[in-house]
Structures are given as structure tokens and as C-alpha cells.
Image (tube, helix red, strand yellow):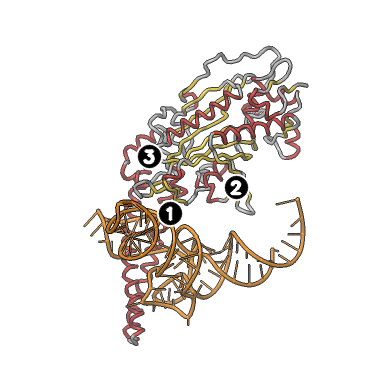
Amino acid sequence: MLEIGILREQKDRVKEGLKKRNISEDLLSLIDTIVEADDTRKSTQTELDQLLADSNLKAKEIGGLIKTGEHQKANQLKEEVAALKETVKNLDLKLKSIKDNIDELLIQLPNVPHESVPNGSKAEDNEVYKSWEKPIPALWSGALPHWELAEKYNLISFKDGVTLTGSGFPVYKGKGARLQRALINFFLDEAANAGYHEIQPPILVNKESAKATGQLPDKEAQMYYCEKDDFYLIPTAEVPITNLYRDTILSHTDFPVKMVGYTPCFRREAGSYGADVKGLNRLHQFDKVEIVRLEHPDHSYDTLMEMVGHVAMLLNKLELPYRILRLCGGDMGFNSALTFDFETWSAAQGRWLEVSSVSNFETFQANRMKLRFRDSDGKTRLAHTLNGSALALARIVATMLENHQTEQGIVIPKALVPYTGFDIISI
RNA sequence: GGAAGAGUGGCAGAGCUGGUUUAAUGCACCGGUCUUGAAAACCGGCGUGGGUGAUACCACCGGGGGUUCGAAUCCCUCCUCUUCCGCCA
């Protein structure tokens, strides 16, 4: 959620920035509507405050009068204050509805893109920030797509998943299951080596949490919901981990806050069908290790690049061909100010698969969740939040199977062997 | 799931027979005096948000609602914690 103060003070800059997202004129004009509504809010607030001050004073007087036994005067004042009550009540209701309205409007505005975000409306407009410099591995004849490899080596059963739950819930078996566990531990250890504090959060969260990180109301349809308890299954560990700091005030000396967590992630993926969902490409449940950072606004972009470096290091160790994209305004998520996507090459499918997304949200999430810090000058300010997948498992597994397949079997990258306990998957 | 008790400012802890306490006091923290320096002592400051040029002022004592001229204090409801019982990885 954008800060209303910034909307007031830097209206033109915000409008210019939002244009990069190709949002409608209607949405842009919302900014003026919000500022106007906020003016009304201020004057209404002032009016109400004065009434309250007045009746507070009189109530105090009544107390004094009763004490000195002047009941007649007291009763007279009582009537006066009682008359104010109705006005106060109405004004209070009015103020509440103005505030609700402002929130409702404010929540519709996406984050202002960082100045480095390229213009564009679709995936093709994303900037290739770092391309894969070596030749993209060509497949030898007889090479298979990952869903066939998974079957051939008996690593994953999509069919059993359908029996147990439905499509998009694969069952990992044997070395397939072991590979999953190895990757999770590998990612967690690498994050720990980089100074991240490990968190194991709940995978069900309440409405407040989902709202604070921006999943509600924007992505409600994307989440599984437990109606009886009013809980949501998390679509990413970002939600519970960032919410650890909801409604808190840190000290500037607390930065950097570095957290990492592994969780399963649940996404309904309503409306996405077709070839893209084949195999491990798009699942309802998958595993992910997520890194989350809270930063001082002065350092958040350095931090973002550091996180990009961390993810790149992981992909290098897994020996996967990848590229990094700087997302264009039209392709970037609602909450983000700047996002780098990582894509690994799916050799058999002949296309790039997104395996990580690293973003700086600046104060957008912090504003919703009231995550502040006391700066060196003593003033409280909103912190910056960032997060990134490091990494998302299913697609990593998919591209590992495809890229590392040989006639002898699937070769495990050296860095991962201590975790799998085997260096090849063969029949 | 059942019963009882409790939720106050960073922490501790008053207030809870409703009205000069619209949050005392202690600790912690910050600034100052004193000191060669430090400790101690003393003086001052010390919650969040709204509002203002700055004050004034307003809201917040787990969340929401109600009674009253007036509520941290009374009532209703929800949440959480503690203890006991039941159940159980």
C-alpha cells in the first residue's frame, strides 16, 4: 500500500512511475480522489476532535459540580453534553466511512516501479539483465522431457498424486524424494552460510497476515482457504516470515534482518491450463526455500543485488544454464518496485522456466503491516522489505533432470552429492 | 472440548467500590550537572497514531460493541495466555 503522504507530496512522480505499469487512466485518477478524500478526512477529524474536547471538558466540570453538591447545575450540563452525543456519533460514523473508503482506494494502487524498471506490457518486454554466456546445451538424440525422465527412473508419480488429491500434487518417490530433501537442505545450508537466520513458520495464516504482505485482496483466488477456521494456506513462505515483524518498531541498528525458511507452497492456479502445466511446470503444491530481508531504505537496493548474487551462486553450483531478467513495468507483481526473475533452460521443452523471483517492495508491504524502525535521528520510518526464492524446487528438479541427463543416467552436480548420497540416478 | 483466573506504555507493576492519576512508581534507555575519566547522586527527557508553523487538542490500557454527562475501571462478545480436567501425536 502506497503511503498517503507520498501521494500528497510527490503526486506527479507517483503518476509518472505508475504509467510504466500501463494502468488505466481511471486508476491513475484515483490518486487525486484519494488526496481529496484525505482532505475531507482531515477536516472531519478536526471537527470531531473539537467536539470531543468540548464534551470532555464539560464531563470534567460535572464531576466537580457533583462533588461540591451543585446537582442542579450538574444536571443542566448533563443535558448539554447529551445533546452533543448525537452529533459526535454521526461525525464518528462519517469519519470511519471516509477512512474505509480511502483504504479501499489506496489498496487498489500498485507499487511505483523503480526508475530502472523498463517500459513494457508483456513478458517479451522484460530486459535480459544477464544472459547465459555459454552455448545453450543441445540435447542428444533420445533425450527426454522431465516428465518422461521422472517416470523412466521412477522418481515422481503424477498418477498417484491424482489418486491421493488431484492434478498438480505429485508424489516423489525413492531417489526422487531424496533429491527433494537434498535440495531443501542444500538451499537452507547455503543461506545459513550467507548469514540468514532459519525460520520454520506455520503454513496456515490468518487474514491479517495475508493482507499485510499483499496477498489479500489482490490474490485471494490464488490461495487455498480453510473456511471453518478462516485460515489461508500460504502461497509462499514470504507471508508468514515477513509477518513476523508486523506492527513492530525496530532500531536502525537491527538491520540487516536476514531470514530464510523452507515451506511447502500452495497455489490454486485457477484458470491456467494447457501445455504449460505439464509435468512439474506448474503445481498446486511445491517446495520452496525463501529468503526475506528487512532493510534500511538507504541500503535496500544494494541488498537486492546481494540477493541476486546469492541466487546466481546457487544456480552455478547446480550447474544449470540460466538467465536473469529485469521485469518490465507491465510484468512486475503488484507489490514490487523492482523484480529480477531467474529462468533456467528447459532443454527438452526448449524454453526458459522461472525458478526464482527476487524483489524489493520498498515500503509497500511495510506500510500495510506497520513495520517501522527508529532511525539514527530518532524518527520512526517505514522499513524496506525484500524477498526472493532461493530456490523453488519443482522447476529446479525439472531442469536438473533434463540438463543433467546422459545415456548412463542423470548426473548429480558435485555440490549436491553430499546431500543426495549418490552421484547418478540410473535404472 | 470442559472449568476457573488473567491480559495496562521496552520490561516490571499500581489503578479495576467509574470523575484533580484521562495511566502512579521502579528498572532500562537518552541528554545534562558533578568528575581527570567512569560509577554513584541529582536535574530533565523518555509510547504510537492523527492534528498544528509550533503549541493546543484528539484517539489508543488484548480486538470489537454497549451502558453513562464521564470507563483502564461496569456489561456483552471474540482472541490470547496460565492452571486444572478430558483427549492425544
Assess disc 1: are there few (<14), some (14-19) or many (≥20) residues with their C-alpha within 10 Å of its C-alpha. few
> In the image, residue A142 lies at what x, y percent?
71, 14
Q: Do the residues bearing badges 2 and 3 touch, measured as CB atoms within 8 Å?
A: no
Q: Callout 2 environment at 10 Å: few (<14), some (14 to 19), or many (20+)? A: many
Where residue A247 sits: x, y (%)? 47, 51
Q: Which residue is mark 2?
A: A232
Residue found 35% across the figure and 44% down from its top = A7
Secondary-structure class at tag 3: helix
Choose between A297 and A222: the one closer to the eye.
A297
The vertical placement of A259 against A344, above or below, is below
Label 1 sits on what residue type? Asp
Question: Residue A100 bears which disc, if any?
Answer: 1
* Circles 3 and 1 on the same subunit: yes
Element class at badge 2 = strand
Residue wearing tag 3: A28
First in residue order: circle 2 vs circle 3: 3
Q: Nearer the viewer, residue A194 or B81?
A: A194
- Residue type beneath disc 3: Leu
